[in-house]
Image (cartoon, rainbow, N blue to C red):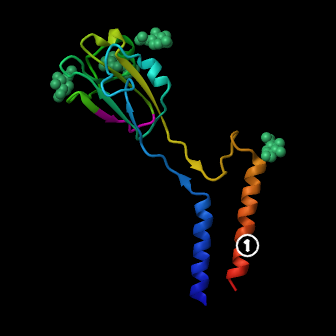
Amino acid sequence: MEVRRKIILCLLMTITMGCYKVEGREPILHRVGGGRYTWTPKANFTTWSSHENFYKGDWLYFGFDKLVHNVLEVNKTNYENCIDTNFIKNITKGGRDVVQLLEARTYYYLCGRGFCFQGMKIAVKVKEPTLQLSPSTLPNKALNSTRIINTKLIGFLITVLIMNVCVI
Ligand SMILES: *[C@@H]1O[C@H](CO)[C@@H](O)[C@H](O)[C@H]1NC(C)=O
Ligand SMILES: *[C@@H]1O[C@H](CO)[C@@H](O)[C@H](O)[C@H]1NC(C)=O
Ligand SMILES: *[C@@H]1O[C@H](CO)[C@@H](O)[C@H](O)[C@H]1NC(C)=O
Ligand SMILES: *[C@@H]1O[C@H](CO)[C@@H](O)[C@H](O)[C@H]1NC(C)=O
């Protein structure tokens, strides 16, 4: 009897916790410029990045002709002034190169050899992933508090009901 009770309690706890589990988010690969081969002077990276959301753990993909272009991570000053010396990291490998955004900060990339002046530079603002509590424990705007209370109350009542029926 004691064992059965524990199993049922355990199940109930799992169900309850399942209702409020934290929803993770899989890292996304962002193709810089929007395509497979779009790290070029023709793309508008300001426009492209304004439609993207970058979160910590996401990846950037740069597709380009490695004989002509490269990808260098630089600091803010050098990004603004298109200076390709004293770069932080050389991302360039084969022309289909990826880099993971491991920190919640702004990353700056440019193409050296003068192409930065033709617009080949990008600032990527990386955000901390927002934890989404489901189904309705988000405290702000999107959800209205009446519904949160109702959902919680219903969840609680169901739990009590199940316990009364099963755990005797
Ligand atoms: C960026 O690097 C340059 C050269 O290394 C340096 O002079 C400058 O102060 C740095 N800027 C920032 C914002 O760190
Ligand atoms: C970056 O790395 C690539 C591949 O290792 C190399 O060919 C290239 O010369 C490097 N670029 C700079 C500016 O150091
Ligand atoms: C990108 O497009 C925006 C809006 O159309 C424009 O203001 C900006 O100058 C463009 N940037 C480049 C590098 O062409
Ligand atoms: C919340 O939703 C309920 C019913 O869906 C509605 O009656 C109430 O006005 C809403 N409250 C707010 C603050 O939006």
Q: Secondary structure at mark 1?
A: helix
The verdict on residue 116 being magenta is no
Position of residue 52 measured from the top left corner of the image (x, y, whole percent): 48, 29
What residue is disc 1 on?
A: 160
User: Horizontally, is 73 left or right of 139 in the view?
Assistant: left
User: Residue at position x 72%, y 68% from top?
Assistant: 158
Position of residue 5 measured from the top left corner of the image (x, y, whole percent): 61, 83
Q: Residues within 10 Å of mark 1 (few under 14, many from 20)?
A: few
User: Residue at position x 44%, y 46% from top?
Assistant: 26
User: Residue at position x 70%, y 86% from top?
Assistant: 168
Position of residue 49 measured from the top left corner of the image (x, y, whole percent): 45, 24
Position of residue 61 measured from the top left corner of the image (x, y, whole percent): 33, 31
Please state, as top left, top right, bottom left or bottom right, where the N terminus lies in the image. bottom right
Up the image or down, 5 lies above or below 103; here it is below
Up the image or down, 100 lies above or below 11; here it is above
Q: Amino acid at mark 1?
A: Val
The verdict on residue 99 being magenta is yes
User: Residue at position x 32%, y 21% from top?
Assistant: 39
The quadrant of the picture showing ligand 4 is top right
Q: Is mark 1 within 8 Å of ligand 4?
A: no
Which segment did they paint magenta? Answer: 98-104
Up the image or down, 24 lies above or below 121; here it is below
**For this rendering, which residue is in front, 130 or 155?**
155
Q: Quadrant of residue 36?
A: top left
